[in-house]
Image (cartoon, helix red, strand yellow):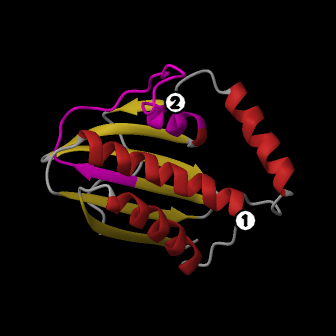
């Protein structure tokens, strides 16, 4: 089973979020992964949320976005220069933001945070479907059902399934 890795350095700026999500989805396709728009949208949303969190709450002028794919699992890691860990919280209905890590917790297979010599890394894993892609409406219903079932946070503090120092 092949392992694919890549890393990008991004400006710590709002414009980097759009670039990051498009690069991430395009990279999976370049590695030969096939998936429908629902899967692409969910993966892009996850990348968007962790990059946005680093842009808004991190420190420094640069971010690092790393991806590792092996089999049907994709590992994503965003490094910034802040040592302040993001937290999962439930935003009030009138809040315009504050739902990012809640979405990551709901949609990622696992996620976590670990310190680095220059700040922190926020990582997540996402399982790409192995089965034939379900119909669009069925996928949305399955996604909603999985969100309802996931009441327990799946966060790991201080550990990562893949080391930050990617080759």
In the rendered structure, the answer to whether residue 55 lies left or right of residue 71 reads: left
Residue 96, percent from left and from top: 45, 32
- Considering the whole magenta stretch, tell me its main secondary structure: loop
Determine which quarter of the picture holds residue 68.
bottom left
Instruction: Read off the magenta span.
Output: 77-106
Residue 104, percent from left and from top: 51, 39
- Calculate the distance from the C-alpha at mark 1 to the C-alpha at mark 2: 26 Å
Q: What crowding class fits label 1: few (fewer than 14 Cα within 10 Å), some (14-19), or many (20 or more)?
A: some
* Residue tagged 1: 36
Q: Identify which residue is drawn at 71% across, 26% down.
A: 148
Q: Quadrant of the N terminus?
A: bottom right
Choose mark 1 or mark 2, whichever is in front.
Answer: 1
Q: Quadrant of the C terminus?
A: bottom left
* Residue tagged 2: 154
Q: Secondary structure at mark 2?
A: loop
Residue 132, percent from left and from top: 83, 63
The residue lying toward the viewer, choosing from 129 and 82, is 82
Q: What crowding class fits label 2: few (fewer than 14 Cα within 10 Å), some (14-19), or many (20 or more)?
A: some
Q: Is residue 78 magenta?
A: yes
The residue lying toward the viewer, choosing from 72 and 84, is 84
Q: Is residue 60 magenta?
A: no
Task: Work out whether mark 1 precedes mark 2 in sequence or the reverse, and give the earlier one.
Answer: 1
In the rendered structure, the answer to whether residue 113 lies left or right of residue 96 reads: left
Q: Identify which residue is drawn at 70% across, 63% down.
A: 37
Determine which quarter of the picture holds residue 144.
top right
Residue 56, percent from left and from top: 28, 42
In the rendered structure, the answer to whether residue 92 lies left or right of residue 55 reads: right
Q: Identify which residue is drawn at 13% across, 46% down.
A: 117
């Amino acid at each position: 089973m092949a392992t694919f890795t890549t890393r990008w350095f991004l400006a710590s700026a709002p414009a980097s979020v759009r670039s990051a999500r498009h690069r991430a989805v395009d990279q999976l396709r370049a590695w030969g992964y096939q998936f429908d728009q629902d899967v692409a949208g969910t993966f892009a949303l996850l990348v968007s949320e962790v990059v946005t969190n680093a842009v808004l709450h991190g420190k420094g002028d640069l971010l690092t976005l790393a991806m590792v794919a092996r089999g049907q699992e994709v590992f994503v890691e965003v490094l910034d220069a802040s040592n302040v860990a993001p937290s999962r919280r439930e935003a009030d209905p009138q809040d315009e933001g504050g739902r990012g890590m809640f979405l990551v917790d709901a949609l990622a297979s696992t996620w976590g945070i670990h310190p680095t010599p220059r700040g922190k890394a926020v990582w997540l894993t996402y399982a790409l479907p192995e089965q034939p892609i379900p119909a669009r409406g069925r996928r949305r219903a399955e996604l909603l059902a999985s969100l309802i079932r996931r009441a327990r946070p799946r966060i790991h503090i201080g550990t990562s399934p893949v080391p930050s120092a990617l080759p």
